[in-house]
Image (cartoon, coloured by chain):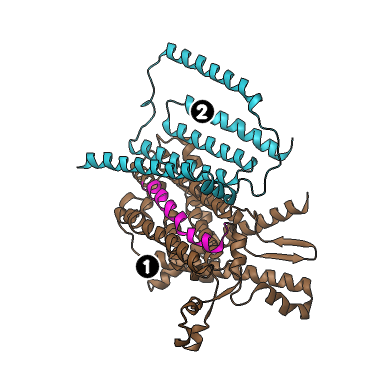
Chain colours: A cyan, B brown
């Protein structure tokens, strides 16, 4: 295998393992959040291997660098130590979850071979900030602006909710 | 191994040796000595070998010996693994930032091209932001894993402060991207190897004749500092807040939180936190130099002129090599000036209250940086690339 392939499979395996570690860790919330950070970084490595450099940088800046830090912030603010989140043992529910997850995985795997794109030569500057920015502000300008409106609405909603409690 | 890989390893070793091995220990001495001068004291001059103290320059060495021989304590009830790992998590992103900062330009030796940067990424500055945003974890985990209330309060403050200032840090240099039309740090350096007429834009209004001659034709280096003065001030404020050194040392405020997030650290693990702050001072100096102070360029002396002037004496090869050495020296001189400026700020300003720090970020600098982006865009749109 070539070096990019090694990185791709290594980061892929790491992201799966750390994602499982995050989901299965119900006792220590901070450790679970840190597993999530590892998942984010592994995904960013995959993006770099796939030439999506801007997305990789944003993945780390936004998800690993800001959102999970906010998760940690809340966890620490409430000072949740171990066992606070330990759910009651519901075996039937767990078994149902496992069956459902396996079913979804099987459906997904069966869809993969037909949806793989044919290998093509990448256009010049693919995945760089110029290419992504041009696409974002020409072809996808309406979804982009609508998303910003959505975020604005969310911010306004959060402010209103927080203010009501303060008053 | 091929030449590219060898070159990359050599450049990595050079920048890490200079920044981590030479600059960071000497800055710990400069910090003491400069504060001593500013506060009219004699300052660090005790450590010595056989009575020879060399201006107290042996203090960093004594510090290292002291830290290495101290006991490394993990407090009771702490989560051991995270407590031990936190200093590493804090130090690695800081050192990794050096990868994209160019300490010299691009040189042509025969048919081989040399550029003095470890990784010449097209999205260079985004890499720095991404890596810097990971540095938050070291602080946050250190405070949480210590099982100490002061540490926890310190890391709460740190996470809020660092996330807030990251936003403004990014926005404050958007204007710079607009002016230089690139995110690649080497291209930014090349763009700054030039001069512009400070009042050149007045010519469009026909006002130049009313000015005295020297002012009308005043040429300034085309540095980010002169094109984006507001951006420079805001960027420097933000990166200093990211570094958590005074006046933004709220996560470790001695008078309020004992020592904040690293209260429970001792020995070399404390030393690693301490050193990573000083390495970050070097990173900040190198980054502001690359972005705002023209990087490796020598003002009023473009690379072609310099090489052209030396070539008749020594030949092209030696001239290019000499130019390279001069550029690296120019870069580190600017880095030293920026380090001095940071120390000056550190010993001049008192620590603000926590809400004042947050207000400064969200209520003053965020709107100002947006105005800066808007005005820059307007100027570029109306008068082309002149600012």
Q: CA distance from mark 1 to mark 2?
A: 47 Å
Q: Main secondary structure of the magenta part?
A: helix
Residue B207 percent across, percent down from the top left: 45, 82
Horizontal arrangement in the rendering, residue A40 relative to residue B140 (left or right): right
Q: Is residue B88 above or below residue B232?
A: above
Q: Nearer the viewer, residue B381 or A34?
A: B381
Q: Is residue B62 visible?
A: no
Which residue is found at the position 53% from the left and 35% from the top?
A: A39
Residue at numbered disc 2? A21
Disc 1 crowd, CA 10 A, few/some/many (<14, 14-19, 20+): few
In the rendered image, residue B165 lying in the magenta stretch gets the answer yes
Q: Nearer the viewer, residue B338 or A40?
A: A40
Using the image, name the chain to which the residue with label 1 belongs: B
Which residue is found at the position 52% from the left and 57% from the top?
A: B279
Of discs 1 and 2, which sits in the foreground? 2
Q: Secondary structure at mark 1?
A: helix
Q: Secondary structure at mark 2?
A: helix
């Amino acid at each position: 295998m070539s070096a990019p392939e090694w990185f791709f499979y290594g980061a892929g395996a790491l992201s799966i393992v750390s994602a499982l570690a995050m989901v299965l860790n119900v006792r220590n919330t901070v450790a679970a959040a840190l597993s999530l950070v590892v998942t984010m970084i592994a995904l960013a490595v995959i993006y770099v291997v796939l030439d999506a450099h801007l997305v990789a940088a944003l993945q780390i800046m936004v998800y690993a660098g800001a959102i999970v830090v906010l998760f940690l912030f809340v966890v620490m603010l409430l000072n949740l130590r171990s066992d606070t989140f330990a759910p009651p043992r519901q075996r039937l529910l767990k078994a149902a979850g496992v069956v459902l997850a396996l079913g979804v995985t099987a459906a997904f795997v069966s869809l993969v071979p037909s949806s793989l794109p044919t290998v093509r030569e990448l256009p010049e500057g693919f995945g760089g900030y110029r290419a992504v920015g041009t696409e974002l502000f020409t072809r996808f300008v309406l979804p982009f602006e609508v998303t910003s409106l959505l975020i604005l609405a969310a911010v306004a909603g959060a402010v209103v909710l927080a203010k009501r409690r303060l008053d | 191994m091929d030449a590219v890989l060898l070159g990359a390893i050599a450049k990595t070793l050079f920048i890490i040796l200079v920044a981590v091995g030479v600059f960071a220990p000497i800055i710990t001495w400069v910090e003491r000595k400069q504060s001593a001068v500013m506060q009219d004291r004699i300052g660090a001059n005790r450590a010595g070998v056989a009575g020879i103290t060399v201006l107290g320059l042996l203090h960093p060495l004594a510090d290292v010996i002291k830290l290495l021989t101290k006991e490394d304590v993990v407090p009771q009830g702490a989560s051991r693994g995270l407590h031990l790992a936190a200093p590493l998590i804090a130090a690695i992103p800081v050192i990794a930032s050096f990868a994209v900062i160019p300490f010299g330009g691009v040189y042509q030796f025969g048919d081989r091209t040399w550029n003095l940067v470890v990784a010449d990424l097209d999205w260079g500055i985004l890499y720095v932001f991404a890596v810097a945003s990971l540095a938050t974890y070291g602080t946050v985990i250190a405070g949480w894993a210590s099982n100490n209330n002061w540490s926890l309060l310190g890391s709460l403050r740190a996470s809020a402060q660092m996330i807030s200032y990251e936003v403004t840090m990014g926005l404050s240099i958007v204007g710079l991207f607009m002016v230089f039309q690139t995110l690649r740090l080497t291209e930014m350096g090349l763009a700054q190897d030039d001069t512009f007429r400070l009042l050149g834009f007045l010519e469009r209004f026909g006002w130049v004749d009313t000015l005295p001659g020297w002012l009308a034709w005043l040429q300034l280096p085309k540095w980010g500092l002169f094109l984006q003065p507001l951006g420079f001030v805001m960027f420097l404020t933000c990166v200093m807040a990211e570094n958590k050194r005074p006046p933004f040392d709220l996560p470790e405020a001695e008078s309020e939180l004992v020592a904040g997030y690293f209260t429970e650290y001792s020995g070399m693990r404390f030393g690693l936190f301490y050193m990573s702050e000083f390495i970050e001072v070097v990173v900040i100096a190198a980054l502001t130099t690359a972005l705002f102070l023209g990087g490796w360029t020598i003002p009023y002396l473009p690379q072609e002129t310099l090489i052209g002037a030396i070539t008749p004496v020594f030949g092209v090869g030696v001239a290019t090599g000499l130019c390279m050495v001069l550029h690296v020296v120019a870069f580190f001189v600017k880095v030293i000036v920026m380090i001095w400026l940071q120390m000056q700020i550190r010993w001049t300003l008192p620590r603000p209250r926590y809400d004042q720090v947050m207000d400064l970020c969200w209520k003053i600098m965020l709107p100002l940086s947006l105005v800066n982006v808007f005005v820059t865009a307007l100027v570029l749109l109306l008068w082309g690339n002149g600012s």
